[in-house]
Every structure is written in C-alpha cells, then in structure tokens.
Amino acid sequence: MNSPFRNSVAVRFLPMLAMLAVSAAGQAPETPEGKFDEQVRIPAGEFIFGDGTTAKTGEFSIDKYEVTIGQYAKFVEWLEQNKDQQHVFDHPRQPAKLSHVPDFWPIYYGQARRGGAAHSSPISLHSPMMALTWWDAYAYAKWTGRDLPTELEWEKAARGEKGSVFPWGDEADLRRANTNADYDERHPGALASIDGSNYWGDVDKHGDDKSPYGVIGMAGNVSEWVGDWVDRHPVIKGGNFTIALQPSSARIVNRLPEDAQEFIGFRTISRTPVAKSPPSP
C-alpha cells in the first residue's frame, strides 16, 4: 500500500496541562500490574514490511500492552531511591543531566493514582505512559533489561507475516482502535460514541485493536517511540487518539527526542528467552 505516512505524519502539538499539581509523594502503590508485564513471542522469519518489501527478523518478545503509568512509576521510585545511579541507563548520546522524571509527572501520576482526570479525561495507573521523551523510554527499557523495538520488529508484531494493513486485517474499522474518531480537543469530557475514547484509554481498553500475534493497541491510543532514527529524529510508530486511523506501515519522523507529547508512549521488547527483572528499589 502506498501510504502518504511513510515519510512523515503531521501531528498537532497539544498544549500542556494547565492545572494545579497534585502531590504524588510517597511510595508507588501496589497495583495489579502483572498482566501488563506480559510479553508476546514473535517468531523469527520473513514478513511483509512497509509498502510490500520482504524483510526478516530474529525471534523476540514484545510487550502485549503499551507501558503504563503504573509501570513507569516503579522506575521513578527506583530513581528517587538511587540518586547516585540516575544516569546508569542513559543512552550514550543523551544530553547530560537530563532527568527521567518527566515534566508534569506529579500531575499525571497524582491524578492517575487517585483515579482522577486530566483534560477532563479519566486517567489511571493503567493508562499509557505518555508525555515522556525518547531518552526516558530508552532508559526505562534498559532498566527493565529490555530494549525499544526496531521499526522492523514493531511492524512485524503489528502486521504479522502476511503484512496486513491494520493489526486486525486489511479493512479499516474505526470502532477497533482509539484514534481521532471521537477526539474533541475543545470538549475533552464529551461522550465518545465510535471507538469509546476521547483522549487516551487504559492500555487494555481497546481489545479489538489486536495484531495477528495478539499484541494490543498498535493502531491507536498513543503512538510509540521505537529504537530507530532518521537523521536527528527517532522513528515513531502506530496511531494515536489525535489522528485518523492509519496503516501499520506509517511512521512519524518529524519529532525530536526531547519532544514529550501526550500522544506518544512506548512499549519494550526482549531479544532473549526470558526478560530480566528490573532492579529492586
């Protein structure tokens, strides 16, 4: 499929939150995050990539769901308790002294922890971790003993061996994925009648957005940082709640690594049979 998204996707810049910070002091709460740690095995072999090219990957396992706020909170807790190791997991090219505690973290995490709202949209510890930089996503992946997927790996997990246009097949279906079908920036509390979400939704909310391997949320909710770069720009894959449904071959390459946005999150992969456990706080 000849997609206009292959070179760049124009995504609107969302204004940052204009609200009072909610305190998130104290230990990260115990939450049922076990299901969100699940990974899906993707076998080695060839698949249809991009606009029809045959490509090949080795075997790997990818997160079944996008990384959640609750999962990222454990990384923030570790950072707070290990201040002498703040940069152990940094990318070699990361600008010095950048923190991996994102801007407005007390707001997002505080509201998620209490089951509150951001932009009048419900947010929980199971919502996707977003508004973080590429450097943050890379460091979190390394902290867990994993990596960011390459574009090839991400696309194989999303499309399967036969290279379907969307994770579920070749037919566009606005009900399956959290895209802009219900997005209303001026009225964030408006009811969603097509895909069921206005802004983000919990990472397991849109179960019909499922790839041939059973990976969830690769066509919508938030777009995802991956490991590859084009010039000075990390590649971003997948749709999000601000843009129309797009094919899995689409890519965004117009964002700098520091460009933290509410519509960009990530997931991780393991290239070894068993993923390592993250360090204890």
Image (cartoon, rainbow, N blue to C red):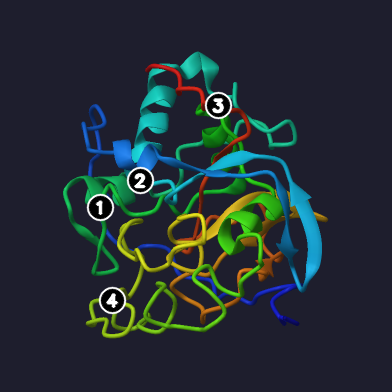
Q: Position of residue 187 (x, y in %)?
A: 29, 82
- Up-down relation of residue 82 to residue 196 (above or below): above
Q: Position of residue 253 (x, y in %)?
A: 71, 64
**Mark 3, residue position:** 145
Answer with left or right where residue 14 lies relative to residue 30. right
**Which of the labelled discs sits on residue 196, or is there none?**
4
Q: Residues within 10 Å of mark 3 (few under 14, many from 20)?
A: many
Kindly identify the amino acid type of the residue bearing the numbered disc 2: Ile
Kindly identify the amino acid type of the residue bearing the numbered disc 1: Ser
Dot 1 or dot 3, earlier in sequence: 1
As helix, strand or loop, the secondary structure at mark 3 comes to loop
**CB atoms at circles 2 and 1 under 8 Å apart?**
yes
Which is more foreground, mark 1 or mark 4?
Answer: 4
Distance from label 2 to label 1 (Cα)?
8 Å
Q: Position of residue 125 (x, y in %)?
A: 27, 47
**Which of the labelled discs sits on residue 69, or is there none?**
2
Q: Quadrant of the N terminus?
A: bottom right
Residue at screen point 51% across, 14% down: 84
Residue at screen point 44% across, 48% down: 64
**Mark 1, residue position:** 124
- Up-down relation of residue 71 to residue 2 (above or below): above
Distance from label 1 to label 3 (Cα)?
25 Å
Q: How many marks?
A: 4
Dot 4 or dot 2, earlier in sequence: 2
Distance from label 1 to label 4 (Cα)?
16 Å
